[in-house]
Amino acid sequence: MTEPREIAIKMIKETLENKVFFSEVKTQNQTLSSQDSGFINMLILTSFRHLIFIKKILKKFVKKKLPATAVYGKYALYLGTAEILYLDTPDYAVINSYVEITKHLADKYVAGFVNAVLRNICKQKETLKKEDKGEFFPPEFFHILNQDYGKKTMQKIQAAAMLEPKLDITVKKDPQTWQQTLGGEILPGGSLRLKNSGKITDLSGYKEGQWWVQDFSAALAVKTLTDIKDKRVLDMCAAPGGKTAQLLNMGAKVTALDISEKRLETLKENLKRLNFSADIICADAKDYIQNFQGIPFDVVLLDAPCSATGTIRRHPELVYIKRLKDVERQAELQKEILSNINKVIAKNGILVYCTCSISKLEGEAQIANFLQNNPTFKVVPITSEELCGDDRLQEIITKEGYIRTLPQHLNAFGGIDAFFVAKLRKEN
């Protein structure tokens, strides 16, 4: 059986070199035991959250650039350093394991080098821990944030993004009852936040379809809607179906559209477990709108394709795989979809536009451009009161009446994902 640390080395290498989500890499190793999967997940995500500092440490001990043949040695050092400094694994276990793995993946010379470096880190680990300033964003990712946020805000984002997020769920009804059953705490607006321990599918109520996993921020878009029972709603880019489930739970008649057949299969499975039903269409959002000839919808929820940079708490690898050009590419696609959105919305209908991006290019700036070119649409200001019944969410409401969440918001509860929501009405 392959050692979990060896699998982790291969996973972090693939994530960084192919610039893909770690979650995508994980799906290729579904045969892992629950224990091994949990350990690998913790090890790699911890490494990503501290990788800036880990690289600085290694520069102190690695004076020569490693040859291409020693690439596995580099990733062994990333993970080994993270384990020594942040996971409190016994030093001898870390050193012995990574040395043997490196022998297998590279050769005995690279393994000897890994051995020497990790031993030096172990000797100085208490001093090194004190030197960690909590740096998270590499220079490339700063280009994304620099456009929109000041230095103080960026520091707060960075600090909050370093913290391991808990598990948020949306329940069909009665959050108080499920809090008594599952524990955790109820967030403003009704999401239930759990401690994120154990296997999700083993938790009470999951198999019975009483709740679904959904980050607090992602749940906000649908919460801006009221009185949609029996209304016709088009949920665009719907998979894996969290917002679709919210809409159906509110009594709407939902058409769920997504370009990915595979992701729609996940949506179908989720809706079946929840005992919900929707009309499901596999199509490209842009093509669907351009060729639309049906009856316009009362409400259109566009969870637009985006850079996903707002999910850095859950996907810390994003700061290494996303660039400003990725944001710009997605913003252009969003603009193309919005350019014809008028066709699918009835008069006096509502458009809810949202993205899980931290960049204003995909949020505030995108909607400003849309409103300039589509004067029949007007902003419907969102209020804290309609989201949670009081003013506890006032910090996430912008002066324009949009929702803009950042990782440091709801800090007392452990922070949230970055998200943007705008609600617009198509007037006669």
Image: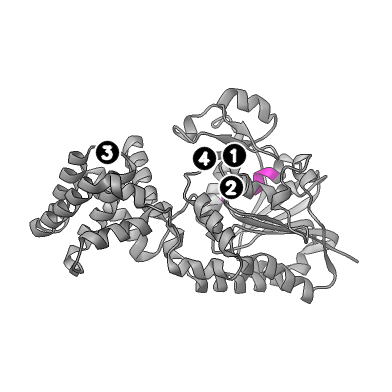
Q: Give the distance between the C-alpha atoms of the residues marked 3 and 1, in whole angstroms.
A: 29 Å
Q: Type of residue at label 3?
A: Thr
Disc 3 marks which residue?
89
Q: Secondary structure at mark 3?
A: loop
Residue 218: x percent and y percent?
Answer: 62, 49
Name the residue at 57% across, 59% down: 152
Q: Is residue 106 left or right of residue 179?
A: left
Is residue 293 visible to the viewer in this orientation of the structure?
no
Q: Give the distance between the C-alpha atoms of the residues marked 1 and 4, in whole angstroms.
A: 9 Å
Q: Give the distance between the C-alpha atoms of the residues marked 2 and 4, in whole angstroms.
A: 9 Å
Name the residue at 74% across, 48% down: 394
Name the residue at 15% across, 49% down: 99
- Res 236 → quadrant: bottom right
Residue 154: x percent and y percent?
Answer: 55, 60
Disc 2 marks which residue?
416
Q: Type of residue at label 4?
A: Lys
Q: Specify the label residue 331 is tagged with.
A: none
Q: Nearer the viewer, residue 401 or 3?
A: 401
Q: Which secondary structure is most common in the magenta stretch?
A: helix
How many numbered discs?
4
Q: Disc 1 vs disc 4: Cβ atoms closer than 8 Å?
A: no
- Which badge, 3 or 1, comes first in the chain's sequence? 3
Q: Specify the label residue 166 is tagged with.
A: 4
Disc 1 marks which residue?
413
Q: Secondary structure at mark 1?
A: helix
- Which badge, 2 or 3, comes first in the chain's sequence? 3
Q: Dot 3, how many residues are within 10 Å of its Cα: few (below 14), some (14-19), or many (20+)?
A: few
Residues rendered magenta in the picture: 240-246
- Which badge, 1 or 4, comes first in the chain's sequence? 4
Q: Disc 2 vs disc 1: Cβ atoms closer than 8 Å?
A: yes
Q: Secondary structure at mark 2?
A: loop
